[in-house]
Image (cartoon, rainbow, N blue to C red):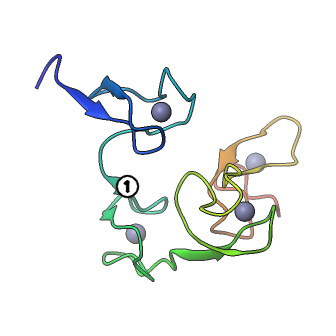
Amino acid sequence: MVGFKHLCRYCDKLVPANANVCPFCGKVNPVGKLRCPKCRNPVEKGWYACSHCGLRLEIICPQCGEKTFLSDYCSHCDARLVVVCKNKKCKTEQAPIADTCVKCGRPL
Ligand SMILES: [Zn+2]
Ligand SMILES: [Zn+2]
Ligand SMILES: [Zn+2]
Ligand SMILES: [Zn+2]
């Protein structure tokens, strides 16, 4: 599989199979399976909940307020679906799936 290129799911350009960021559109996780942000189980767009941990995969986008599938970006406004911990020493970026920071435990 080394050197084999995949289509970016966002801009449809060919990017390396192991790319973490698309070099063409700059979006994260451009190739490979979508994964549950909680348990990393592979999930598919359109699922209501993760088949492994039951995490709800349909959320309200914090930017536009529309329902969107929980992945890296909102399917309506393209906003990055992450929250940043308000704790200045932490500032961990995480999927908006919990009320408290995954790292320091502070309320988000
Ligand atoms: Zn791209
Ligand atoms: Zn899961
Ligand atoms: Zn949105
Ligand atoms: Zn934190």
Is residue 41 shown left or right of residue 45? left
Residue drawn at x 44%, y 39% as measured from the top left = 29
Q: Furthest-front residue in view?
A: 12
In this view, the residue farthest toward the top is 3
Identify whether 97 is placed above or below 92. below
Total tally of numbered discs in the picture: 1
State whether label 1 is within 8 Å of ligand 2: no
Describe the element under mark 1 as helix, strand or loop.
Answer: strand
Compared to residue 24, the image places residue 95 above or below, namely: below
Which residue is located at x 67 percent, y 49 percent? Answer: 80
Above or below for 48 versus 57: below
Residue kind at label 1, given as amino acid type: Leu
Q: Does residue 102 lie above or below 59 as drawn? A: above
- What residue is drawn where x is 83% and y is 34%? 89
Closer-to-camera residue (60/84) = 60
Q: Neighbour class for label 1 at 10 Å: few (<14), some, many (≥20)?
A: some
Q: Quadrant of residue 48?
A: bottom left
Whole-percent x and y of residue 66? 72, 75
Please give the residue where the numbered disc 1 appears in the rendered image: 34
Quadrant in the picture for the C terminus: bottom right
Residue 19: give x, y in percent of width and height.
37, 26
The quarter of the picture where the N terminus appears is top left
Quarter of the image for residue 58 reads bottom right
Q: Is residue 92 left or right of residue 24?
A: right
